[in-house]
Image: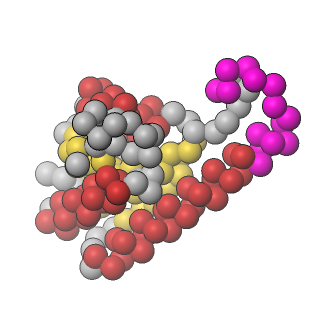
């Protein structure tokens, strides 16, 4: 049933709990994990047309990519220490998080998406995060939102 599971991670506690659940599901159903982190690059439009030096934007984007690699490295370590014996793929996507997660799920023909209820956006604890809310509304596969 859950042979291919997408699990986005951003370094938040909620994302790590979601990764634990995804590992358990994939293990139970002998499935594959696709662990991804999504980087939303800076550009002038995203900064509401505040004029910034192109070099500053490029450096900020490079810093974000390094952070993304670090998050994926942590995720890979967590999957390995969990004892998961199945296939796990790790990827970085660039763009809006909910759009990229849905696109990867469609492209990979995922059977499920497992994600944290809120990430590092600073949204109050009792609100469902905007990314998890959009994923749950627009996904064509089952979505497990982990608190």
At x 67%, y 21%, the residue is 48
- Horizontal side, residue 70 vs residue 118: left or right: right
Q: Position of residue 39 (x, y in %)?
A: 56, 44
- Horizontal side, residue 70 vs residue 26: left or right: right
In the figure, 129 relative to 13: above or below?
above
Q: Position of residue 12 (x, y in %)?
A: 40, 54
Decide which of 104, 16 is in the foreground and name it.
16
Decide which of 135, 122 is in the foreground and name it.
122
Quadrant in the picture for residue 13? bottom left
Q: Position of residue 94 (x, y in %)?
A: 57, 42
In the figure, 78 relative to 31: above or below?
below
Q: Position of residue 93 (x, y in %)?
A: 53, 46
Residue 147 in magenta? no
At x 57%, y 39%, the residue is 40
In the figure, 80 relative to 99: above or below?
below
Quadrant in the picture for residue 34? bottom left
At x 64%, y 39%, the residue is 41
């Amino acid at each position: 049933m859950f042979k291919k599971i997408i699990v986005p991670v951003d370094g938040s506690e909620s994302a790590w709990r979601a990764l634990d659940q995804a590992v358990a599901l994939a293990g139970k159903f002998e499935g594959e994990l696709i662990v991804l982190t999504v980087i939303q690059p800076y550009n002038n439009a995203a900064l509401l047309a505040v004029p910034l030096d192109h070099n500053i934007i490029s450096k900020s984007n490079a810093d974000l990519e390094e952070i993304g690699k670090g998050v994926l490295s942590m995720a890979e370590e967590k999957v390995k220490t969990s004892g998961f014996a199945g296939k796990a793929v790790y990827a970085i996507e660039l763009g809006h998080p909910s759009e990229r997660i849905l696109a990867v799920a469609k492209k990979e023909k995922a059977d499920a998406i497992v994600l944290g209820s809120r990430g590092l956006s600073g949204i109050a604890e009792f609100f469902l995060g905007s990314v998890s809310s959009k994923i749950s509304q627009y996904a064509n596969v089952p979505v497990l939102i982990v608190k």
